[in-house]
Image (tube, rainbow, N blue to C red):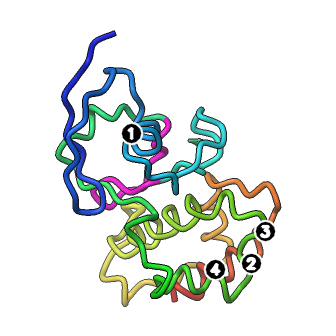
Amino acid sequence: PQRLSVTLTVNGEDHALALDSRTTLLDALRDHLHLTGAKKGCDHGQCGACTVLVEGRRINSCLALAAMHEGDAITTIEGVGTPQALHPLQAGFVRHDGYQCGYCTPGQIMSALGMVEEHRQGWPSHATGSVADRPALTREEIAERMSGNICRCAAYPNIVDAISEFAG
Ligand code: FES
């Protein structure tokens, strides 16, 4: 297999890595950088547990090759809040009991952060005007836009509560 020198920028820090060209972004994060917040649920793009932000956009890191993201700003759950100072969305998940086993939670939170930013920026493209002019996301819209993130414990109502509160 071909080895590549790849520098990944994760949570604001550059990391020089020597990777097999086929290494996924998820495996680079977990196995090479020991950032194990992003989870490997399915490794097939079906569960969302591996969600991270790349340039602010949410992606399934199990479907991305690490080498494709050299130079991109990658954000993982380790870059969101701290145990002493939770991000407001993390605090919302605690307040609303938005998890049971917690395995999907990092992916849920990264996906929700990306989703709220998509809304702020006017996605989908037929949205017009500033976010202040647009109605808040409904519970149904949040559930649909979060449908790529599976919770095997089915804590969905509480997850939507937490995201709804955060999204305003
Ligand atoms: Fe990537 Fe399931 S581990 S979508």
**What residue would you read off at disc 4?**
93
Confirm or deny contact between disc 3 and disc 1 (CB under 8 A). no
Q: CA distance from mark 2 to mark 4?
A: 8 Å
Q: Is residue 62 above or below residue 148?
A: above
Looking at the rendered structure, the secondary structure element under dot 3 is loop
Considering depth in this image, is 125 or 11 the residue closer to the camera? 11
**What residue would you read off at disc 1?**
32
Q: Residue at the location (65% across, 43% down)?
A: 41
**What residue would you read off at disc 3?**
100
Q: Residue at the location (37% across, 90% down)?
A: 132
Looking at the rendered structure, the secondary structure element under dot 4 is helix
Considering depth in this image, is 48 or 140 the residue closer to the camera? 48
- The magenta segment: 52-62
Q: CA distance from mark 3 to mark 4?
A: 11 Å
**What residue would you read off at disc 2?**
158
The disc placed on residue 58 is none
Looking at the rendered structure, the secondary structure element under dot 2 is helix
